[in-house]
Amino acid sequence: MALFSTDAKAKALAAAPLLQGLAKRELRELAKVTEDLDFAEGKVLCREGDWAREFFVIVDGEARVSKKGRRVAMLAPGAFFGEIALLERIPRTATVTAVTPLRALVLTSQTFWSLVDRHPGIERKILRALVERIRRTEVDDPTLR
Ligand code: CMP
């Protein structure tokens, strides 16, 4: 069941820092091909090692990012996740779990790529976030030492 109308989804998309700069018309187009989903607290949205391709933008609620069972980050409304498996065509690099009831907008791989292709600014924001995420992730894999 759709939770949001196209207008409400466009508004939620506009609130995400990643998508700031998109014209109203583009936000509406994007909203039409974006799924809005409601998740219960505790729901695993991405599981480390799984092959999956969705890209998520959090509208409401918080999520925990963990690697090998250890928390590496918390994500708040406006944050996005799921970009790494998409960009690199590798399994999920972390587990992302809703720690509160969570609403998210979910983009398919196809929608994600057409967005990135049309907006170099979005690609740059994703790259910057990636660098930050890498910088903040502790290396605890003994094979890397
Ligand atoms: P992906 O690997 O597709 O699925 C798990 C997601 O968790 C990953 O994409 C990133 O979006 C996110 N993620 C992984 N590592 C970190 C980190 N150190 N900080 C914040 N988010 C992360």
Image (spheres, helix red, strand yellow):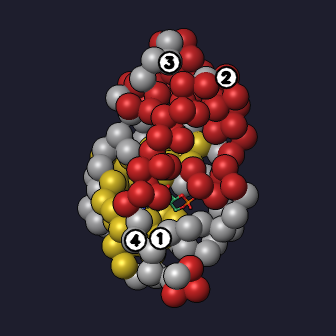
- Labels 3, 4: front one: 4
Q: Name the residue under label 2.
A: 118
Measuring from the top left, give residue 66's x and y in whole percent.
Answer: 40, 72
Q: Residue at x 56, y 79 (%)?
A: 144
Q: Which residue is drawn at 38% across and 45% down?
A: 79
Q: Badge 3, how many Cα within 10 Å: few under 14, some, many 20+?
A: some
Q: Residue type at mark 2?
A: Arg
55 left or right, relative to 52: left
- Labels 1, 4: front one: 4
Secondary structure type for disc 3:
loop
Mark found first going from the N terminus, 2 or 3: 3
Measuring from the top left, give residue 34's x and y in whole percent.
Answer: 56, 37
Q: Which mark is residue 138?
A: 4
Distance from disc 2 to disc 1, alpha carbons, whole Å, reads 29 Å
Most extreme residue toward the bottom is 142
> Which one is in front, 95 or 27?
95
Mark found first going from the N terminus, 2 or 1: 1
> Which one is in front, 33 or 52?
52
Q: Residue type at mark 1?
A: Thr
Mark found first going from the N terminus, 3 or 4: 3
Does label 1 point to a residue whose CB lies under 8 Å from ligand 1?
A: yes
Q: Which residue is drawn at 50% across and 49% down?
A: 130
Q: Name the residue under label 3.
A: 22
Distance from disc 1 to disc 4, alpha carbons, whole Å, reads 15 Å
Measuring from the top left, give residue 1's x and y in whole percent.
Answer: 50, 47
Does label 4 point to a residue whose CB lies under 8 Å from ligand 1?
A: no
Q: Residue type at mark 4?
A: Glu
The answer to whether the residue labelled 4 contacts the one labelled 2, judged by CB atoms less than 8 Å apart, is: no
Q: Badge 4, how many Cα within 10 Å: few under 14, some, many 20+?
A: few
Distance from disc 1 to disc 3, alpha carbons, whole Å, reads 29 Å
Secondary structure type for disc 2:
helix
Q: Which residue is drawn at 64% across and 58% down?
A: 85
